[in-house]
Amino acid sequence: MIIVMKNGSTKQDVEKVIEALKEHGLGANLSTGSQATIVGVLGDKAKLGGFDFELMDCVEKCVPIMHSYKLASREMCPDGRVVQVGEEVIGRKKLVMMAGPCAVESEDQITQAAVGVKAAGAHFLRGGAYKPRTSPYSFQGMEEEGLKLMRKAADACGLKVVSEIVAHDQIDTAGKYCDMLQIGARNMQNFRLLREVGRSKIPVLLKRGISSTVEEWLDAAEYIMSEGNYNVVLCERGIRTFETATRNTLDVSAVPVVKERSSLPIIIDPSHAAGKSKYITSLSLAGIAAGADGLIIEVHPNPKVAMSDAAQQLTPEAYATLFQKVGALAKVIGREMQ
């Protein structure tokens, strides 16, 4: 349930409502928007008994939230949430660009990638240190050593670091090197992992599962937010369909659906959707045109020798060209790149 305050309500009025919730064993999520101030009720509203907030002079109305995801809903924060990662803000007018190789392979490789994506204009360096692969015989990543190399390369170039973790016992280690933790498609419903990253308070990039509905995806985000971590960014990376021309099918329609139903920022991963580098630019432009808040793209200094997902990685030169095209589109739709 959300409690909508009347126009002109004071800070003291809001505090009275929050205090009344606390007296009934409930929590509160305050959202001060351009149109209204909203107090979200956290917990089982049955605890209110017969207490009616609409009888308070400062309350306009009470509205039930019918979704299973409450904190992630648009009703809870009508103006939308923003996620702050250092000086970078995701969810406002500026598009946030994340780029880097599928996997960290060596210091020279990740350094070249960082230099290349920074020169193009990227804000985050992405790269896999823990690699959950379909085959146990495939390259599994450099783990902590890979994170160290990413941090070093990112710091040298003035970039933030985002990297995937695949188990809850990796959070403390990754937290020493990463500005943002990625939860991959395979782990979208790893509920223990979601709760633990929620408790960590580290910003989270939550990818959509390959066979998950938008509602299941938002429920996964709710697991993180229910532990007090509201710094969640959603990532559409394509879903599994009958089509075989691409690795996955990019669900562009998920962007406006999420914008309508949820307050969370959303970015697009065209690399995993396409599986082929030649489609990445088109999918990137489609995602931004649909309203996405940014892109995460795989970029390798020499994709032909990449140890994983070689076919879907761009060269730094190709990424720079893509960046310019996205920048041109951004001007048309009222977004910014820098």
Image: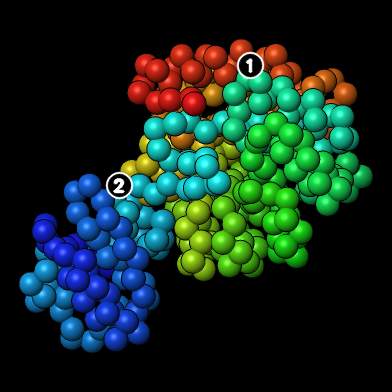
**Is mark 2 in CB contact (under 8 Å) with mark 1?**
no
Nearest to the observer: residue 238 or residue 241: 238
Residue found 84% across the figure and 29% down from its top: 109
- State the residue at coordinates (70%, 31%): 157
Front in this rendered view, residue 88 or 59: 88
User: x%, y% of residue 203?
Assistant: 56, 53
Residue drawn where x is 7% and y is 72% of the image? 57
Q: Going from the N terminus, do you reach mark 2 or mark 1 first?
A: 2
Q: Is residue 189 left or right of residue 215?
A: right
Foreground: 167 or 203? 203
Q: Quadrant of residue 2?
A: bottom left
Q: Amino acid at mark 2?
A: Asp
Q: Is residue 203 above or below residue 63?
A: above
Give the amino acid type for the residue marked by disc 1 in the picture.
Ala
Determine whether 127 is above or below 54 in the image: above
| Marking on residue 79 | 2
SS under mark 1:
helix
Which residue is located at x 48 percent, y 41 percent? 89
Report the disc number at residue 320. Answer: 1
Between 280 and 58, the one lying in front of the other is 58
Marks 2 and 1, how far apart at CA = 32 Å
Q: Residue furthest right?
A: 137
- Horizontal and vertical percent position of residue 70: 38, 62
